[in-house]
Amino acid sequence: MNVTFEGKTETGKDEWLTPPELIKALGDFDLDPCSPINRPWDTAKRHYTIKDDGLLMPWEGRVFCNPPYGNQTGKWLEKCAMHNNAIALTFARTETRMFFRCVWEKATAILFVKGRIKFYHVTGEQSNSAGAPSVFIAYGQNNAEALRRCDIDGKYLEINK
Protein backbone atom coordinates (compact mmCIF):
# COMPACT_ATOMS: atom_id res chain seq x y z
CA MET A 1 0.00 0.00 0.00
CA ASN A 2 3.08 2.25 0.02
CA VAL A 3 2.35 3.32 3.57
CA THR A 4 4.74 4.82 6.04
CA PHE A 5 4.39 3.85 9.67
CA GLU A 6 2.52 7.07 10.43
CA GLY A 7 -0.41 5.85 8.30
CA LYS A 8 0.36 8.10 5.33
CA THR A 9 1.08 6.97 1.80
CA GLU A 10 4.27 8.05 0.08
CA THR A 11 2.17 10.61 -1.76
CA GLY A 12 1.08 12.11 1.58
CA LYS A 13 -2.49 10.80 1.54
CA ASP A 14 -4.05 8.99 4.45
CA GLU A 15 -5.10 5.38 4.33
CA TRP A 16 -8.83 5.12 3.67
CA LEU A 17 -10.58 2.55 5.84
CA THR A 18 -13.85 0.92 4.89
CA PRO A 19 -16.70 1.91 7.21
CA PRO A 20 -17.26 -0.96 9.67
CA GLU A 21 -21.00 -1.09 8.96
CA LEU A 22 -20.30 -1.90 5.30
CA ILE A 23 -17.96 -4.75 6.21
CA LYS A 24 -20.49 -6.08 8.73
CA ALA A 25 -23.21 -6.03 6.05
CA LEU A 26 -21.08 -8.37 3.91
CA GLY A 27 -20.57 -11.05 6.59
CA ASP A 28 -17.49 -12.51 8.22
CA PHE A 29 -14.12 -12.58 6.48
CA ASP A 30 -11.13 -14.81 7.16
CA LEU A 31 -8.46 -12.46 5.77
CA ASP A 32 -7.85 -8.81 4.98
CA PRO A 33 -4.59 -8.69 2.98
CA CYS A 34 -4.54 -4.84 2.80
CA SER A 35 -4.99 -3.92 6.43
CA PRO A 36 -3.35 -0.87 7.98
CA ILE A 37 -0.78 -1.51 10.67
CA ASN A 38 -2.82 0.47 13.19
CA ARG A 39 -6.53 -0.02 12.68
CA PRO A 40 -9.41 1.07 14.88
CA TRP A 41 -11.39 -2.13 14.14
CA ASP A 42 -10.83 -5.56 12.68
CA THR A 43 -12.06 -6.32 9.18
CA ALA A 44 -11.34 -10.06 9.26
CA LYS A 45 -10.02 -12.84 11.50
CA ARG A 46 -6.48 -12.37 10.07
CA HIS A 47 -4.80 -9.27 8.70
CA TYR A 48 -1.78 -8.68 6.50
CA THR A 49 -0.23 -5.22 6.59
CA ILE A 50 2.38 -3.53 4.44
CA LYS A 51 4.99 -5.27 6.59
CA ASP A 52 3.65 -8.63 5.37
CA ASP A 53 3.03 -7.69 1.69
CA GLY A 54 -0.35 -9.33 1.21
CA LEU A 55 0.25 -9.79 -2.52
CA LEU A 56 3.06 -12.23 -1.77
CA MET A 57 1.45 -14.01 1.17
CA PRO A 58 -0.88 -17.00 0.76
CA TRP A 59 -4.58 -16.25 0.91
CA GLU A 60 -6.93 -18.65 2.67
CA GLY A 61 -10.66 -18.53 3.22
CA ARG A 62 -12.97 -15.65 2.47
CA VAL A 63 -11.07 -12.42 1.73
CA PHE A 64 -12.02 -8.76 2.08
CA CYS A 65 -9.76 -6.53 -0.03
CA ASN A 66 -9.82 -2.73 0.00
CA PRO A 67 -6.62 -2.39 -2.04
CA PRO A 68 -4.40 0.62 -2.52
CA TYR A 69 -6.01 2.76 -5.20
CA GLY A 70 -3.93 3.69 -8.21
CA ASN A 71 -1.56 1.73 -10.43
CA GLN A 72 -1.37 -1.19 -7.93
CA THR A 73 -5.14 -1.84 -7.76
CA GLY A 74 -5.13 -4.24 -10.72
CA LYS A 75 -2.56 -6.53 -9.07
CA TRP A 76 -4.80 -6.91 -6.02
CA LEU A 77 -7.91 -7.54 -8.13
CA GLU A 78 -6.01 -10.14 -10.18
CA LYS A 79 -5.15 -11.96 -6.96
CA CYS A 80 -8.80 -11.72 -5.85
CA ALA A 81 -9.84 -13.29 -9.16
CA MET A 82 -7.27 -16.08 -8.86
CA HIS A 83 -8.31 -16.79 -5.25
CA ASN A 84 -12.00 -16.74 -6.33
CA ASN A 85 -13.29 -16.23 -2.77
CA ALA A 86 -13.12 -12.48 -2.22
CA ILE A 87 -14.98 -9.21 -2.09
CA ALA A 88 -12.99 -6.17 -3.14
CA LEU A 89 -13.86 -2.49 -2.81
CA THR A 90 -12.52 0.08 -5.22
CA PHE A 91 -13.55 3.12 -7.21
CA ALA A 92 -16.03 2.40 -10.00
CA ARG A 93 -13.70 3.36 -12.84
CA THR A 94 -15.65 1.19 -15.26
CA GLU A 95 -13.97 2.49 -18.41
CA THR A 96 -10.39 1.62 -17.47
CA ARG A 97 -8.33 -1.26 -18.86
CA MET A 98 -7.88 -2.52 -15.31
CA PHE A 99 -11.65 -2.64 -14.76
CA PHE A 100 -12.22 -4.48 -18.03
CA ARG A 101 -9.42 -6.97 -17.35
CA CYS A 102 -10.01 -7.60 -13.64
CA VAL A 103 -13.71 -6.94 -13.14
CA TRP A 104 -15.81 -7.18 -16.32
CA GLU A 105 -13.92 -10.29 -17.49
CA LYS A 106 -13.33 -12.07 -14.16
CA ALA A 107 -15.69 -11.01 -11.37
CA THR A 108 -18.88 -12.89 -10.55
CA ALA A 109 -20.95 -9.85 -9.55
CA ILE A 110 -20.68 -6.21 -8.57
CA LEU A 111 -22.57 -3.82 -6.34
CA PHE A 112 -22.41 -0.16 -7.32
CA VAL A 113 -22.77 1.82 -4.08
CA LYS A 114 -25.43 4.53 -4.13
CA GLY A 115 -23.81 7.85 -3.26
CA ARG A 116 -20.24 8.31 -2.10
CA ILE A 117 -18.71 6.33 0.75
CA LYS A 118 -17.35 8.27 3.72
CA PHE A 119 -14.17 6.35 4.49
CA TYR A 120 -12.32 6.55 7.80
CA HIS A 121 -8.78 7.53 8.78
CA VAL A 122 -6.63 5.19 10.91
CA THR A 123 -7.48 7.45 13.85
CA GLY A 124 -11.10 6.31 13.60
CA GLU A 125 -12.28 9.70 12.34
CA GLN A 126 -14.62 9.72 9.37
CA SER A 127 -13.51 11.62 6.27
CA ASN A 128 -15.51 13.63 3.79
CA SER A 129 -17.16 11.72 0.96
CA ALA A 130 -14.85 9.88 -1.43
CA GLY A 131 -13.76 11.63 -4.59
CA ALA A 132 -15.41 9.03 -6.83
CA PRO A 133 -18.18 6.42 -6.75
CA SER A 134 -17.33 3.02 -5.29
CA VAL A 135 -18.09 -0.57 -6.23
CA PHE A 136 -17.93 -3.85 -4.35
CA ILE A 137 -16.62 -6.67 -6.54
CA ALA A 138 -17.47 -10.31 -5.82
CA TYR A 139 -15.22 -13.15 -6.89
CA GLY A 140 -16.98 -16.48 -6.37
CA GLN A 141 -20.66 -17.33 -6.23
CA ASN A 142 -20.93 -17.21 -2.42
CA ASN A 143 -19.61 -13.65 -2.45
CA ALA A 144 -21.97 -12.68 -5.26
CA GLU A 145 -24.81 -13.96 -3.10
CA ALA A 146 -23.49 -11.94 -0.14
CA LEU A 147 -23.58 -8.79 -2.28
CA ARG A 148 -27.08 -9.60 -3.54
CA ARG A 149 -28.41 -10.14 0.01
CA CYS A 150 -26.62 -7.32 1.85
CA ASP A 151 -28.41 -4.15 2.88
CA ILE A 152 -25.91 -1.77 1.30
CA ASP A 153 -27.85 0.68 -0.84
CA GLY A 154 -26.89 0.42 -4.49
CA LYS A 155 -27.34 -1.51 -7.71
CA TYR A 156 -26.38 -5.22 -7.85
CA LEU A 157 -25.32 -6.72 -11.16
CA GLU A 158 -24.33 -10.32 -11.85
CA ILE A 159 -21.73 -10.35 -14.62
CA ASN A 160 -20.09 -13.80 -14.86
CA LYS A 161 -21.33 -17.11 -13.48
Image (tube, helix red, strand yellow):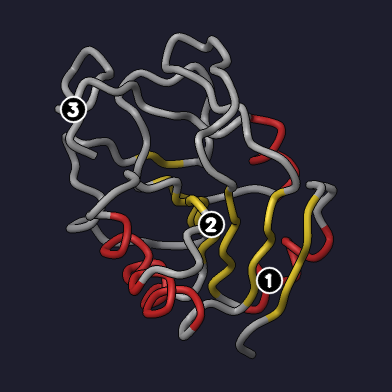
Residue at disc 2, secondary structure? loop
Where's residue 10, x and y in %? 15, 27
The residue that appears at 18% across and 17% down in the rendered structure is 5
Cβ atoms under marks 1 and 3 closer than 8 Å: no
Task: Please say if 8 is above or below 89.
Answer: above
Q: Which of the two marks, 1 or 2, is nearer to us in this view?
A: 2
Q: Mark 3 = which residue?
A: 11
Q: Which mark is residue 92?
A: 2
Q: Which mark is residue 144?
A: 1
Residue at disc 1, secondary structure? helix
Query: Going by the image, does 81 lie left or right of 18?
Result: left
In the picture, the quarter occupied by the C terminus is: bottom right
Instruction: From the viewer's side, name the closer residue of 92 and 125.
Output: 92
Task: Please say if 62 is above or below 69.
Answer: below
Residue at disc 3, secondary structure? loop
Where's residue 122, x and y in %? 42, 17
Rounded to the nearest angstrom, the CA distance separating label 1 from label 2 is 17 Å
